[in-house]
Image: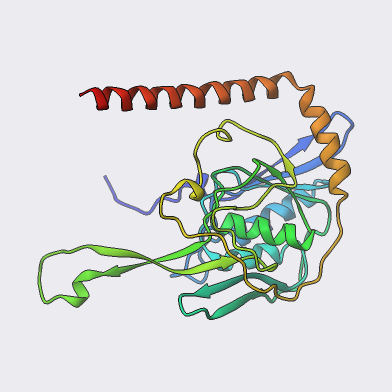
Amino acid sequence: MIREEVAIEDTFARSIVINTPNGKKYGFINLPSFNADFENAKGRNASDDIKNEIIKLKAQNIEGIILDLRNNGGGSLTEVGDIMGLFMDAGPYVQVKDGNGKIQTLKNKYETPIWTGPLVIMQNELSASASEILAGVMQDYGRAMIIGSPQSFGKGTVQTFVDLNRFLNTEDDFGSLKLTIQKFYRVTGESTQRKGIVSDIQMKDFFTYAEVGERYDDFALAWDKIPSTKFQKLNYFNIQALEKASADRMAKNSNYQLLLESAQWRENWIKRRRLRLISISLMN
């Protein structure tokens, strides 16, 4: 067998066209991660992939785009700014604070949006880190509507690895320490830590009743807030009207109601099983 580098296509952005009963067409883009090739200037990255998908979708005369960030655990922070620039003009997209209290504001410098039409971003409890930064900034600007789980994962911290061997004169491998060195903040100044991003239109799913997210970790850092940075608010959607229409539809959707019942049953079963195991352990 010949060893070679294999690109796993499922980790890159992909798109399809959704045809509705009334004849309208919408573009659906799934982004599994904010991938970036830092070693190769011509390498593949998430923003270029999404740009190519948008170009293909526009050629099919779509009327709106849905960007799916469900189960996306994050990746390159710079890709957030580049993806933001595909949908709107330049501006700040995240604030970063280090352990000394120093705050840095990262800005998208490109004013070349290629899609200025309606934009919806989907998220769930497993959307984390860079996913939350992108969803949060598009929500803060009012450029996109966020649909999905009541809130995302809530990871608002930055980690780095410190190799312990660099401090020791030994050939033994002592491993590494994973240290939290920074926290993320939205352009409004609010942290994404623990609280995550609250969806504009909330739709509970199979994980809603489970203990998924940073807020369930025993020693997770607390939510906090810093001063807002300057940004220009946009007004693309009437959130209240759309939220009511969605709630009315979901209340009548039997498949959705069945999903909620299944999710609640699963979580209740897990809790009963956990209590049973604790009881057995105490008896022994």
Q: Between residue 102 and residue 10, name the one nearer to us.
A: 102
Q: What colouring does the structure picture have?
A: rainbow
240 on left or right of 36: right
Q: Position of residue 197 (x, y in %)?
A: 64, 52
Res. 235 image quadrant: bottom right
- Say above or below: 123 vs 176: above
Quadrant location of the C terminus in the rendered image: top left
Image location (x, y in percent) of residue 149: 64, 40
In the rendered view, does 126 fall on the left or right side of 175?
A: right
Depth check, front residue: 109 or 237: 237
Q: Residue at x 26, y 69 (%)?
A: 163
Where residue 83 sits: x, y (%)? 66, 62
Left or right? Give the position of 260 relative to 232: left
Residue 252 drawn above or below residue 109? above
In percent of width and height, residue 74 lies at 52, 55
In the image: residue 130, left or right of residue 253: left
Q: In the rendered view, would you say 205 is above or below 52?
A: above
The N terminus sits in image quarter: top left
Residue at 50% x, 65% y: name it: 43
In terms of depth relative to the viewer, which is nearer, 136 or 78? 136
How many numbered marks are there?
Answer: 0
